[in-house]
């Protein structure tokens, strides 16, 4: 296994990580800002409200996008497990 193949796999892993993390992160930011604006406008000082709503939204987004987001993850895992014997051949 060469250094370039390790770097390539790490790069692909980071791309898959970004694909997985962006939809829940964007939804959480949008909901957090919306709840923050509503709380500022109504002067509600409850700290558990935004956390609960963001948690529910993140779980819903992951549940909705899981079938779509799983495809690159499964492909990468298959590639890594297929190449694993060649990676460990020299050790």
Image (cartoon, rainbow, N blue to C red):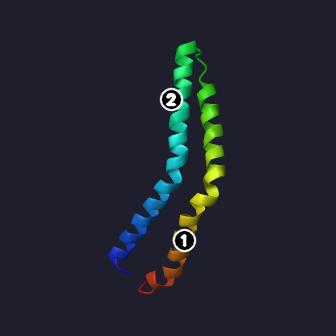
What x and y, as percent, mark residue 70?
59, 62
Which type of secondary structure does the marked residue at label 1 adopt?
helix
- In which quarter of the view is residue 28 placed? top right
Label 2 close to label 1 by CB (< 8 Å): no
What x and y, as percent, mark residue 69?
57, 58
Residue that numbered label 1 is attached to: 75
- Counting residues from the start of the chain, the first of labels 2 and 1 encountered is 2
Instruction: Report the number of numbered marks.
Output: 2
Q: Quadrant of the N terminus?
A: bottom left
Q: Residue at x 38, y 72 (%)?
A: 6
Q: Residue at x 46, y 54 (%)?
A: 18
Q: Quadrant of the C terminus?
A: bottom left
Q: Is residue 37 above or below residue 69?
A: above
Residue that numbered label 2 is attached to: 33
Q: Nearest the camera: 39 or 80?
A: 39
Q: Is residue 67 above or below residue 39?
A: below
Q: Residue furthest top?
A: 43
What x and y, as percent, mark residue 55?
62, 38
Q: Is residue 87 above or below residue 52?
A: below
Which of the labelled discs sits on residue 27, or is there none? none
Q: Residues within 10 Å of mark 1 (few under 14, many from 20)?
A: few
- What is the CA distance from the residue labelled 2 to the residue labelled 1? 35 Å
Q: Residues within 10 Å of mark 2 (few under 14, many from 20)?
A: few
Query: Left or right: 9 with respect to 42?
Result: left
Q: Residue at x 54, y 28 (%)?
A: 34
- In which quarter of the view is residue 52 placed? top right
Which type of secondary structure does the marked residue at label 2 adopt?
helix
Q: Is residue 47 above or below residue 28?
A: above
Q: Residue at x 58, y 65 (%)?
A: 71
């Amino acid at each position: 296994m060469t250094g370039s193949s390790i770097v390539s796999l790490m790069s692909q892993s980071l791309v898959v990580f970004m694909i997985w993390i962006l939809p829940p992160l964007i939804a959480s930011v949008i909901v957090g800002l919306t709840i923050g604006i509503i709380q500022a406008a109504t002067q509600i000082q409850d700290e558990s409200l935004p956390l609960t709503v963001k948690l529910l939204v993140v779980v819903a987004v992951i549940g909705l996008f899981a079938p779509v987001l799983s495809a690159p993850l499964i492909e990468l895992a298959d590639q890594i497990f297929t190449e694993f014997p060649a990676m460990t051949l020299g050790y």
